[in-house]
């Protein structure tokens, strides 16, 4: 029994390592004219400090929910705060009237992609390996996920 449990655990280790090495990708609707963002601008969008696309349409921000894939990396690399810090930050913005509502939290990468592919002004985050042709990957500082120097690991 003990050997079986250890064997099963050993089968999961490569999957866990691959999931951690898979960079996160910022995605938008394929018709969105934005192809690249600076890291600073991406942070401003996800922190809802920049709320409109260049064409004047409001940006619909989607982030992985607490159960979502990549949530810890989003907290570390985009928000640079803890879960509690993010909740406090967003509630403060709502109460001060800076934003009408916080970003939508999506727990499933499939749902994230379906939402982004259905809403032309949405922006979201998934693992790079989960991207398909229903969405467009936005370059960050001119780099694709996985490319050397890409900042969203």
Image (cartoon, rainbow, N blue to C red):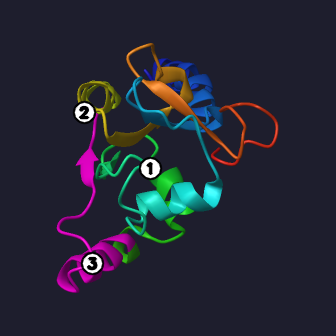
Give the residue drawn at x 44%, y 13%: 133
Quarter holding the N terminus? top left
- Secondary structure state at the residue bearing disc 2: loop
Give residue 150's mark.
none
Q: Which residue is mark 1?
A: 54
Quick one: label 1 or label 3, which is nearer the N terminus?
A: 1
**Is residue 65 found inside the magenta-colored segment of the image?**
no
Residue 85 placed where, x, y %? 39, 77
N-terminal of the two: label 3 or label 2? 3
The magenta-colored residue range is 86-108
User: Which of the two marks, 1 or 3, is nearer to us in this view?
Assistant: 1
Task: Work out whether residue 47 or residue 2 is closer to the camera in this orientation and state it.
Answer: 47
Magenta stretch contains residue 92: yes
Q: Position of residue 86 (x, y in %)?
A: 37, 71
Examine the rendered structure and indicate whether residue 67 appears above or below residue 79. Answer: above
Secondary structure of the residue carrying tag 1 is loop
Rendering coords of residue 122 (x, y %): 32, 40
Which residue is outermost to the top? 133
Give the quarter of the image for residue 45: bottom left
Q: Quadrant of the C terminus?
A: top right
Q: Position of residue 91 (x, y in %)?
A: 24, 77
Q: Residues within 10 Å of mark 3 (few under 14, many from 20)?
A: few
> Residue placed at 30% from the left, 46% from the top?
67
Distance, label 3 to label 2, CA atoms, is 23 Å
Q: Of residues 123 and 112, which is closer to you in this image? A: 123
Q: Earlier in the sequence, mark 2 or mark 1?
A: 1
Using the image, tell me which numbered label, if any, was put on residue 119: 2
**Cα distance, mark 1 to mark 3?**
19 Å
Residue on which the image places disc 3: 98
Looking at the image, which residue sits at the far bottom?
96
């Amino acid at each position: 029994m003990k050997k079986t449990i250890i064997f099963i655990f050993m089968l999961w280790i490569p999957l866990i390592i691959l999931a951690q090495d898979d960079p996160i990708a910022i995605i938008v609707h394929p018709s969105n004219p934005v192809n690249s963002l600076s890291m600073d601008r991406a942070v401003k969008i996800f922190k809802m400090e920049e709320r409109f696309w260049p064409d004047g349409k409001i940006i619909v921000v989607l982030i992985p929910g607490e159960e979502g894939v990549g949530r810890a990396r989003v907290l570390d690399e985009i928000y640079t705060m803890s879960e509690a810090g993010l909740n406090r930050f967003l509630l403060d913005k709502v109460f001060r009237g800076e934003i009408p509502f916080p970003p939508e939290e999506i727990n499933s990468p499939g749902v994230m992609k379906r939402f982004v592919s259905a809403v032309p002004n949405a922006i979201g985050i998934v693992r790079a390996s989960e991207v398909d042709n229903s969405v467009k990957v936005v370059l960050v500082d001119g780099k694709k996920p996985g490319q050397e120097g890409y900042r969203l690991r």
